[in-house]
Amino acid sequence: MGARFPFTSYPRGWFAVAFSGDVAAGAVKTVHYFGQDIVLFRTAAGGLSALDRTCPHLGAHLGAGWVDGDCLRCPFHLWAFDGNGRCVEVPYSNRIPAKASVSAWPAREVNGVVLVWHCPRGEAPTWEPPVLPEDRWTADRTDRWEIHSHPQEVAERAVDSAHRRPTHHAISVDAPTIVTDGHHMHVTWPQAGGAAREAVNAADADAMDPVDAVLDVTLDGLGMIVSTTHVLTTNLRARRRIYPTPIDEERIAIFGVHNTERTPDVQFTREVDEIFYQAYVAEFPRDFPIWETKAYLDQPVLVVS
């Protein structure tokens, strides 16, 4: 990484590179993450693959090619590559060179997000991204931000209960409960105020009392964060998925997806969803100016209360 973040490489794990709707059937899309171009292509049947950009023949950018059946055609000499990066056809020859392949990224589409596996040692995935239930939740509302930061800064937010009062206007926040298991971490903490209070107060101007809520946060690696707010006062739930992905050594993209748990009243659900969403897009970016300018400290001075 760059001088600001003294890590030896980009982190390992599953990272978002697009929303599913960004790549239509039969389309090719080039995205830039981990300091390099990644070529996404979707077949007419819906299958999605991710390849490195460079054709091994004469170096053409495969992002300028097109989908042909289950393959991606190079725009230069029409060599065809399947979703695993293997050359399966050279139009003017019956022989396919043994080295005619391009590196493929392990890719998954989960809950409307395109994820690729990154490992600095080139190792295959050792775990799969979790699939979240969708049937009782509203449709995805998506956002994407770019800031100068690192995924680790975003992940640390999940356990930094002390910052929620000055940064996110929480009235009180209890110490979080943290459970870790390999790549997976589960964090829960009760709080009063914050975005939950703003959402309820927006719905009811007279509701100025503190709003009790429980935040339930799961992290799978550094690239996947799911934060669910359960407002105990009204038994409403909002779910926010956060996917921080390195663009280069200094910048990250943050893919955000918002949902609200449905209620029996369709109109009420629509109104609550809008209130929670507006609170989310106002509240979450409050961290950005701090992340953009803070220094990374390998051994910070800490206090235990």
Image (cartoon, rainbow, N blue to C red):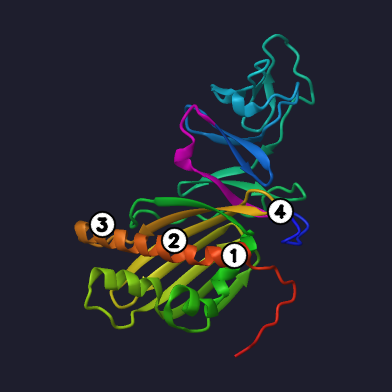
Query: What's the distance in space between the residues labelled 4 and 3, CA to CA?
Result: 40 Å
Q: Residues within 10 Å of mark 4 (few under 14, many from 20)?
A: some
Q: Nearer the viewer, residue 126 or 78?
A: 78
Query: What's the distance in space between the residues labelled 4 and 1, CA to CA?
Result: 18 Å
Query: What's the distance in space between the residues labelled 3 and 1, CA to CA?
Result: 33 Å
> Which residue is painted at 60% across and 69% down in the image?
156
Mark positioned earlier in the residue sequence (3 or 2): 2
- Left of 143 or right of it: where is 297? right
Query: What's the distance in space between the residues labelled 2 and 4, CA to CA?
Result: 24 Å
Mark positioned earlier in the residue sequence (4 or 3): 4
Under circle 3, the secondary element is helix
* Kind of residue indicated by mark 3: Arg
Label of residue 291 in the image: 1
Residue 27 within the segment the image draws in magenta: yes
Mark positioned earlier in the residue sequence (2 or 4): 4
Label of residue 270 in the image: 3
Q: Nearer the viewer, residue 84 or 10?
A: 10
* Kind of residue indicated by mark 2: Arg
> Which residue is painted at 47% across and 38% down in the image?
22
* Badge 3 vs badge 1, beta-carbon distance below 8 Å: no
Q: Residues within 10 Å of mark 2 (few under 14, many from 20)?
A: many
- Left of 54 or right of it: where is 115? left
Label of residue 10 in the image: 4
Label of residue 240 in the image: 2
Query: What's the distance in space between the residues labelled 3 and 2, CA to CA?
Result: 16 Å
> Picture coordinates of residue 269 (x, y %)?
25, 60
Under circle 4, the secondary element is loop
Mark positioned earlier in the residue sequence (3 or 1): 3
* Badge 2 vs badge 4, beta-carbon distance below 8 Å: no
Mark positioned earlier in the residue sequence (2 or 1): 2
Mark positioned earlier in the residue sequence (4 or 1): 4
> Picture coordinates of residue 264 (x, y %)?
22, 61
